[in-house]
Image (tube, rainbow, N blue to C red):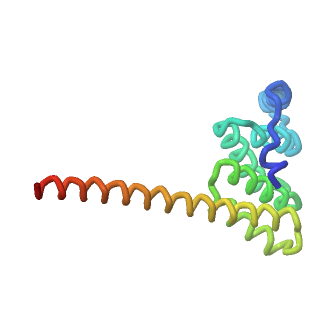
Amino acid sequence: MEEILEDYISSEDLKKFEAVYHNHLQDGTVTAREQFDYAWCLIRSKYPADIRRGVVLLEDLFLNGDATAKRDYMYYLAIGHTKLKDYNRALKLLSKFLSIEPTNRQAQELQKYVKDKMRKEGLLGMAIVGGAALAIGSVVGIGMALAKK
């Protein structure tokens, strides 16, 4: 799963797909395939702003595109949200996807990855809060000890 989430597109390739998309957009002839290709390129970018633009394009396809491709759009949206660390949205999409296709191995693996990330980051978050509380407690304790002297 990490191969997909850590697969970054080169800036040259992104520029090529961007040019094709914008040329067709100006002509009013953008196909769902061109929009999807450009969105997938954006999601594979290293930059969160690009990933967000890719998510917006995929959401448009999901809402207005071909109904038979919705499951694909859901999966790639889940990848985009995962890369943006919007794990709750990713899990909602994956849950919906797996309710339609419960044996899809890629969706299952992505769901497991997201849950593992949430667990790790949740524990990390608690460790940071716990460490901060310990530090504050120490400072208060030291202050009280000095005040008694």
Q: Nearer the viewer, residue 65 or 3?
A: 3
- Classify 49 as above or below 119: above
| 147, 66: nearer the viewer | 147
From the image, which quarter does the N terminus lie in? Answer: bottom right
Q: Position of residue 93 (x, y in %)?
A: 72, 63
Residue drawn at x 70%, y 41% is 51
User: How many discs appear?
Assistant: 0
- x, y percent for residue 24: 83, 31
Res. 141 image quadrant: bottom left
* Residue located 79% across and 67% down the image: 97
Question: Does residue 50 appear to the left or right of 39 in the view shown?
Answer: left
Residue 73, percent across and down? 80, 55
Q: Which residue in the rendered view is the most extreme toward the front?
A: 149
Q: Foreground: 3 or 65?
A: 3
Residue drawn at (87%, 57%), measured in percent from left and top?
Answer: 69
Residue 140, quarter of picture: bottom left
Task: Identify the image quadrant of the C terminus.
Answer: bottom left
Decide which of 102, 136 is in the foreground and name it. 136
Point out residue 106 in the picture as x, y percentages from the top left corner.
86, 62
Residue 51 to residue 62: above or below: above
Q: Residue at x 63, y 65 (%)?
A: 119
